[in-house]
Image (cartoon, rainbow, N blue to C red):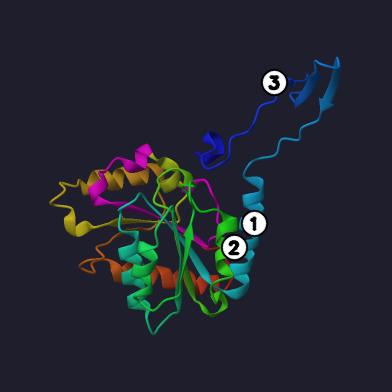
Amino acid sequence: MCTECGCGLPPQEHDPNEHEHIDEHGNRYTHSHDHAQGRKTDLIAVHKSIMSANDLKAERNRGFFQGIEVLAVNVLSSPGSGKTTLLKRLIEKLAGRKKCGVIVGDLETDNDARRLRETGAPVVQVSTGTLCHLDADMVSRALSELAVRDLDILFIENVGNLVCPATFDLGESSRLAMLSVTEGEDKPLKYPPLFRFADSIVISKIDLAEACEFDRDLAIENIRAINPKAPLFEVSAKTGEGIESLLAHLLKGLTRQKQPSQPLPGL
């Protein structure tokens, strides 16, 4: 994960004169020897979680969404699972009923953003470059380009990745994880954090299940082994199967978001 591998972070230069030690209390500190001058300098290092700044920004985002009564849905999945097609179908179904906007995260290109703009919804593209996920600050900055106070639902289409996006809280109201039938049944077991922390789960492209020899029962068993409680939807954005049930679930979550004193179970 990004908190461990440091993907997207610039390399740190190492001072050959600097050495790290751990004291009797388990605290880390470094000291540097100036061999040319024969001096030793103690450098007190305060080690904070790499996620602390993100978590603080996420809480601010969450408070903002609650304050303006917007349901922010963070959509996570692998590349090619059908996020964009599903969101396009949902937005089209909600047209005239609820105002939707989208933040799209991709390393490069605005292909998904252009497809979603065909719905007439406002869309902001975030190009992450070398980063394989969105973070709370990226979402916060993207909000300045949306008339978000005019929206009812904000969809955040995260970068296609089953690992790193699961680690980063964006301040969303709801986290929706997707598994397509083309990926196989074992992805929840291979990448448990993405499914474990989901508030709702979608099995997508079910119109292709037979052609892919997808074992539905095994897939659901694997999902429930990781997340026993999250509402589960089987959906085809192509045929429309399951779309109405998912829409009803989202609208129920929006109603709860407009009553911020109540918890948001399942969303």
Image side of residue 94 versus residue 254, left or right: left
Query: Which amino acid lies under the numbered mark 1 shown in the image of this protein?
Result: Lys
Q: Report the residue at 20% width, 68% height from top.
A: 239
Find out whether the residues at labels 1 and 2 contact each other: C-beta distance under 8 Å.
yes
Q: Amino acid at mark 3?
A: Pro
Tell which circle, 3 or 2, labels the residue nearer the N-terminal end.
3
Q: Pointer 2: what residue?
A: 140
Any magenta on residue 230? no
Q: Which residue in the protein does label 1 denote? A: 57
Q: Secondary structure at mark 2?
A: helix
- Residue 154 place in picture, x, y as percent: 48, 69
Q: Nearer the viewer, mark 1 or mark 3?
A: 3
Which region shows up in magenta?
A: 165-190
Q: Is residue 211 visible?
A: yes
Front: mark 3 or 2: 3
Question: In this view, which residue lies farthest toward the front?
Answer: 36
Near mark 1 (Cα within 10 A), the count class, few <14, some 14-19 or many ≥20, is many
Mark 1 or mark 2, which has the lower sequence index? 1
Label pair 3/2, CB-CB below 8 angstroms? no
The amino acid sitting under disc 2 is Ser
The residue where tag 3 is placed is: 16
**Front position among marks 1 and 2:** 2
- The count of marks equals 3
SS for tag 3? loop
